Amino acid sequence: MCGYFANTFLPRVGEILRCTLLSKYEKIPTTKLIGTILVERVFDLFCYFLLLVITFLIQIETVSNFIREKISHISSMKQGLPVWLIIPGIIVAGIIIFSLIKWIFNRYRHHHYIIKLKGFHLGLKEGFSAILHLKKRKKFIAHSVFIWACYLSEIYIGFYALDATSSLGIGAAFSVLSLATLAMIVSPGGLGAFPIAVQQVLLIYGVDNIFFGWLMWGVTTGIIIVVGIISFGLLIYQNKKKNEKERYA
């Protein structure tokens, strides 16, 4: 919750804070923690892709018309280099950068900075390995799916809070979650972007209402801020008790 609280104001700072807190309180190496976070993000990406597929399949006509409209709109506004030049350019640049990094690592392998980077790389690798060989892998997957189900339920149940959205079903909830997730990534805590993204999705279903997006964002952000502050307080209290025990031990 401290991590979510930090992400509300500065994107991705929560992951750094989470590593710092766990490293301090649980005595786990930071590199291992970064590895586990990267694996979680990969699994989240997989869940998001699965969400998009389900959204497309359960309302293929509605979503395909929307996508077709947006693509044609982007195509009409497109400027600059054509896609057939951009994609090979990115691939070539990636190969050059990778080759350069590999050469630097081989040429200066005894430099203390390179040794530190190699140690960091091994820590990340160990973090990935720890997740991939989880003893409770099924629980990890089940909890991840449950979290996404909660996101979906928040939107679906939230539809009934307003007359304008009360007629929308689970299909619309899938669509809102699909686009709203991107909005949470592009701005700190989804501020501004989340309500607009939700409004754009609702327009597909003939509902012109931006208040629903602000309602969903406000409730979620409010919970994160309140519980995040409480969590920080509990950490400070726990640390204080721990220091007192060590002092009188």
Image (cartoon, rainbow, N blue to C red):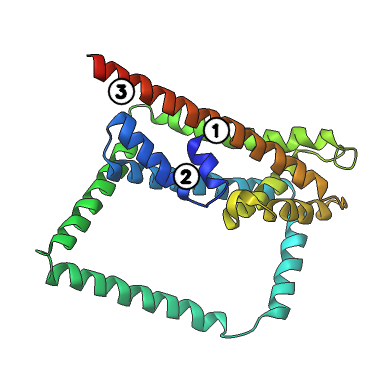
Residue on which disc 2 sits: 14
- Dot 1 or dot 2: first in sequence order is 2
Q: Amino acid at mark 2?
A: Gly
Provide residue 100's location: percent of width, then percent of height: 25, 75
68 or 223: which is nearer to us?
223
The Cα atoms of the two marked residues, 1 and 3, are separated by 21 Å
Query: What residue is pinned by disc 3?
Result: 243
Quadrant hosting residue 239: top left
Mark 3: secondary structure:
helix
Q: Residue at x 59, y 37 (%)?
A: 148
Closer mark to the observer between disc 3 and disc 2: 3
Q: Residues within 10 Å of mark 3 (few under 14, many from 20)?
A: few
State the CA–CA distance, disc 3 to disc 2: 25 Å
Residue at coordinates 87% horizontally, 50% vertically from top-left?
A: 207
Numbered label attached to residue 59: none
In which quadrant of the rendered view does residue 109 lie? bottom left
Q: Which numbered disc covers residue 229?
A: 1
- Of residues 62 and 163, the one nearer the viewer is 163
Disc 2 element: helix
Q: Is 119 displayed left or right of 79 in the figure?
A: left
- Relative to 222, is 34 above or below? below
